[in-house]
Image: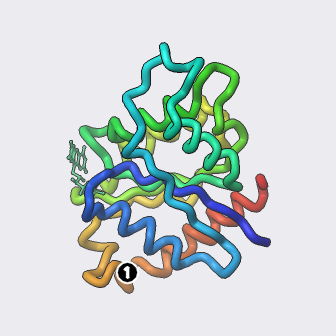
Amino acid sequence: MSLTIAVIVGSLRKDSFNARLADALAKLAPDGIEFRRLRIDDLPLYNQDDDASPPAPVQRLKQEIRDADGLLFVTPEYNRSIPGVLKNALDHASRPYGESAFVDKPAGVIGVSVGAIGTACAQQHLRTILAYLDMPTLAQPEAFLKADDVLDDDGGIAGSSREFLQQWMDAFLDWVKHHA
Ligand code: FNR
C-alpha cells in the first residue's frame, strides 16, 4: 500500500536534531511510503483577521496536509512545551472554524531533545492539541529521545536505538494504514 506522510518538524534550526531524526525515520519505512517535509518557516504569525483571505503559504500548507494520508510531527521541546513556530502552523491549518485541514488525519508524535526529558512535556502538550483537532494519534509506543543516544555522526540512527525506532515506525505506519 502506498502512503504519503506529511512531516512537520518543530524546529527551524539549520542543524536541527529533530530534522535529522525526521530524515532518519523516513529511511526506516518500506518502499512505497513517501515522506514530504512541509515548510512552516514562511508562515506569517497567525492573525484571525486574515481568515477570509489566507496568504499563499497557509493555503499551500493546508493543501499539503489534505493531500497526505497521515502526519508525522517531529518536534523539540521549548520551555516544557512545543515551539511557537509549530503552534503557529497548527493554528493556521486549523482555521477558519469548520475548515481545518487536520480533521481525521492520523498522526504520530516524536521528538528529540538535548536533555534527558526527551521532549516528554512537549509531546504531552502536542497530544492535547491534536486531540482537540480531532486527529487520531498513535498512543504507543511513546518515544522520548535524547540526541546523544539516538543520532550518530553520519545523520543516521545509533545502533542501540535502531530496533526501537524501527518498531515505532512500523506501529506508526500500521496506524496510518488503519485510518487511511
Ligand atoms: C530549549 N531546549 C529544551 N530542552 C528540553 O529538553 N526541554 C526544554 O524545555 C527546552 N527548552 C528550550 C527552549 C528554547 C527556547 C530552546 C532554544 C531550547 C533545548 C533543546 O532541546 C535543544 O535546543 C534542541 O537542540 C532543539 O531541537 P533542534 O533545534 O536541535 O531540533
Instruction: Answer left or right for 140 relative to 154.
Output: right
Rendered-image quadrant of the C terminus: bottom right
Instruction: Give 167 or 67, whichever is nearer the viewer.
Output: 67
Rendered-image quadrant of the N terminus: bottom right
Residue at position x 56%, y 62% in the image: 36
Instruction: Answer left or right for 67 relative to 85.
Output: right
Residue 135 place in picture, x, y as percent: 65, 40
Residue 64 visible, this orientation: yes
Residue 109 place in picture, x, y as percent: 50, 52
Residue ID for mark 1 = 156
Quadrant of the rendered image containing residue 88: top left
Residue 129 visible, this orientation: no
Residue 23 place in picture, x, y as percent: 44, 70
Residue at position x 67%, y 54% in the image: 68
Q: Amino acid at mark 1?
A: Gly
Secondary structure under badge 1? loop
Residue at position x 57%, y 43% in the image: 60
